[in-house]
Image (spheres, rainbow, N blue to C red):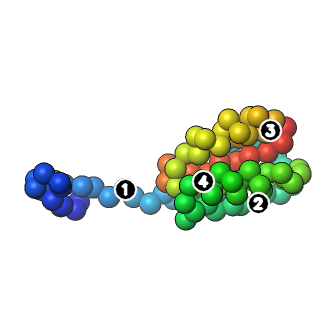
Amino acid sequence: MDRMTNTFGRTVARTRLHATTMEPTDVLDSEAVPDRAGHETLDVRELPPPKPLQETLEAVVDLGDVVLIQINDRRPQHLFPKLEERGLEYESTGEDPVYTAIWKP
């Protein structure tokens, strides 16, 4: 647990989150994700907004019969409606990082 002084001059305790032990391919184990021959990963954790959204939408254009796994530091809530508009399906799991599997039905 870390101690820090906040804006009001009060010392507060802050706990650190533990790193997840999940792997990107763990999202493929979900019953919702179809069994496909292959998958590709796209790590957008270091990109500033709106780059994660843009990079992912560019990657799904030529998706073919593979599953794309987006790795993000947060739940890509603005991505989901865009995927639905394009007729794509997705499954998301994890907290930080968040793994989102995207595929064509």
- State the SS at label 4: loop
For the residues labelled 3 and 2, the Cα–Cα distance comes to: 19 Å
Query: Going 83% across and 51% down the picture, which residue do you hit?
Result: 61
Earlier sequence position, callout 2 versus callout 4: 2
The three-letter amino acid code for the residue at tag 2 is Glu
Q: Which mark is residue 50?
A: 4
Q: Which mark is residue 86?
A: 3
* Badge 4 vs badge 3, beta-carbon distance below 8 Å: no
Mark 4 Cα-neighbour bin, 10 Å: few <14, some 14–19, many ≥20: few
For the residues labelled 1 and 2, the Cα–Cα distance comes to: 28 Å
For the residues carrying marks 3 and 1, which lies nearer the camera in this image?
3
For the residues labelled 3 and 1, the Cα–Cα distance comes to: 35 Å
Q: As rendered, which of 49 and 12 lies closer to the eye?
A: 49
Query: Going 48% across and 57% down the picture, which residue do you hit?
Result: 20
Mark 2 Cα-neighbour bin, 10 Å: few <14, some 14–19, many ≥20: some
Return the x and y of residue 93 as percentages of the image width and height.
Answer: 58, 45
- State the SS at label 1: loop
Earlier sequence position, callout 4 versus callout 3: 4
For the residues labelled 4 and 3, the Cα–Cα distance comes to: 18 Å
For the residues carrying marks 2 and 4, which lies nearer the camera in this image?
4
- Residue 47 shows up from this direction: yes
Q: Identify the residue position indicated by label 2 in the image.
A: 40
